[in-house]
Image (cartoon, coloured by chain):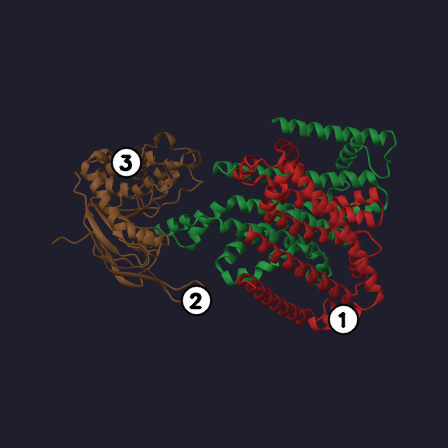
Amino acid sequence: MTQPHIRLSDVEMTFSRPDGVGEDIHALGPIQLDLRHGEFFAVVGPSGCGKSTLLELMIGLTNPTKGTITFEGQPINGSCPDGIGVVFQEDASFAWLTVRDNIAFGLRRMALDRREQDERVEQALAMMGLVEFADVYPSQLSGGMRQRVCIARTLVTQPRLILLDEPFGALDQQTRLLMGDEILSLWRKTGATIFLITHALDEAAMLADRIGVMSSRPGQLIDIVETNWPKDRDSRIVENDAFGAVTARLWRSLRVESMKAIGKKDAQA
Amino acid sequence: MTKAGLIRLALIAVLLGALEVLVRIGRIDALTMQAPHKMLLDLYAMLASGKLNKAIAKTMGNAGFAFVIAVSLGVISGLMIHRMRRVRETLDPLFATYYAIPVFAFYPLLILLLGLGDAPQIFIGVMLGFVAVVVNTLNGLDRVPRVLLKTARVNGMNGLETALKITLPSAAPYILTGAKFAVAYSLIGVIGAEFIMSTGGMGYEISFAYNNFDNATMYPLIIMILVASISINMVISRWEKSLLKRRGLQ
Amino acid sequence: MSPSTRRLIVNMGWLTLVILALWQGLYALIGDIALRSPLATLQFTAKFVTTPQFATHLAETSKAFVLALSIAMASGLAIGFVLGLKRFASDIFEPFLIAIYSVPKITLYPILLLVFGLGLSAKVAFGAIHGIVPIALFTLNAVRNVKPVLLKTARVMGLSSTTTIRTVIFPSALPEIFAGLRIGFSLTLIGTLLGEMFASQRGLGFLLMNAIGLHNVDVIVMLTFLLTGFAGIAGIVLLLINRRITAQA
């Protein structure tokens, strides 16, 4: 049996209230999850279900209250291991650096010689279609292009596991579909494992091999859907008959949870 | 130049012209206000004679020194206070009311503590400028997007690295705003202190000239201070604007 | 009382304690030659504030400050509203305001004295120019930053321009306008006092300057204490009101 790429066992997260009064908030878990090497895994869930907390646990920004997370056999403890790259939902480009310097920033932790560094930056620029924008500042780019800069900044480190936290949340629908295509082609080219957090069911259905459905708080995995898409898919998969079935199944699992999340007490299945 | 800028220039020209005419025809008497051209001639004569160079050097030097201390100390303190929530909450009311405090009242005490030299004047300048820098630095640090700090942590940066490479660059436009205030405040501090009690410097010379109806000395000195503070301010503003523009904020 | 208000007052208490401790410590260090202990200052203050001499100077300063603040508020708000509503006018005049804000106004005082003569009007003018500019700049920005969608809504509803100002622009800009008034208050106060310090024969600023000249430590420390205390308390009260307005908006 091969070792999972990343394993979450019995992971739980509880926050104490900021003012110290009242009960603690049980935000997440318990969660069991194994990601296979090279798979594309997406997580969908209602807002406030702890998706982003889950991501913070996986990159070591927060330690779980209970349970352990192991990446390539090593437990994650308080810092982000080499080999994991992350792209956040918000614009994380550095406004004071050019696109090229932004991307090179990702390499600062690595002891690489100058030539290797330049090569990797050029590669990332080319892969994300940013070559002609290498010397401009992020403010001159659209939101989608800025998000590409952040993806490129992650790619230069050649991560084996890429975590994406609603990276297209702020973009319009068409751009999202096209960015989805790019992520798929990146995934094939790099062979990395991808873990995508999203609230868009169609996005998850289109991109992922497996989709985990999370419940409302405390977030737990209530369903895992296999899509069985071919590896060389792209956004045109939405024309496939099975696409509707996958999306429908996601919504069936999620509808009651989403109603709970917006405060409908009498939610019924 | 923009249309608004041209109108602005024209307005200044009209105002100066009107002043010139009013003084020349005697509607404004020469003991109150000098004709603008006369102020310039006096300024030239004053600089050419060099008799006040020492006073000018003293004041500008002290103000410059106060400015540098206020900005560097202010930024460092801002970074430190930002990390200590309790300290910050305790200091907040002080920051909110600081500029209503008559700082010059502390001058006699400072003279006693620091001696009769330039130190108390510089200290007053620092006292005034420092808080503006701290407040604006804190304001800038509050606005550093959380995602950038997360990025720093994912990249395994320590506190110092994060400050130098992420938070300070991100807060730079706000720090420059603080620096602009510090220019004015360090001049106010130094000149005000010279007004109160001093035997030299531009503030002393201005009040001496005022008491002796020596408008030929007073106006050029005032103009010098105004021009110096406005030009330094414009330089910083321009820098600030280019930073903001690069960030798409203006 | 809201938790944030309570926290502010608790913090204020801590701050007062820290300052008193520092004051006492400094006094222990330098002694009576240039400082008085907090207790001695309180005793002297209690005695001094009942004298007719103090009452006269306080009345003079109050009069100058109230006048200066009224002028600063009226003209600051007027300038701010006009420039905030008229984009082109603000393009022309805003740089002037910023320039005035950024010069050390203390250097302008001799000119004001020559224009207004020694007396009440010069220090009122000096106090007012300290206050006008921040009030005008904050109001200008507040009015300009009113959300366009609110203005569109007002137009759709067919509101007249005065009604729009009264019912839409003013309430939505109020928190920021009040922040300007708060800063204007502080700066007008310090402007008035500086005016009295540098050239005047009456008022608390004059009293302070006189005490500095005579090296009357009792009076220096007392006035510093009184003025700082007043500025501090007034500033906190205004800050609390400001927070309440901001929370409602």
Chain with green colouring: B
Q: Label 1 amino acid?
A: Ala
- Front residue (pair C136, A174): A174
Q: Secondary structure at mark 3?
A: helix
Mark 3 — on which chain does it sit?
A: A
Residue on which the image places disc 1: C46
Q: Label 3 amino acid?
A: Glu
Q: Can you say which quadrant of the picture contains the N terminus of chain A?
A: bottom left
Residue B172 seen in render: yes
- Front residue (pair C48, B105): C48
Depicted B170 relative to depicted A31: above or below: above
Residue on which the image places disc 2: A20
Q: Colour of chain C?
A: red
Residue A192 in the image, given as x and y percentages of width and height:
23, 44
- Front residue (pair C140, B183): C140
Residue A5 in the image, given as x and y percentages of width and height:
20, 51
Q: Label 2 amino acid?
A: Gly
Mark 3–mark 1 Cα distance, whole angstroms, equals 77 Å
Mark 2 — on which chain does it sit?
A: A
The residue at the point 25 percent across, 35 percent down is: A235
Chain with brown colouring: A
> Do the dots labelled 3 and 1 sit on one chain?
no
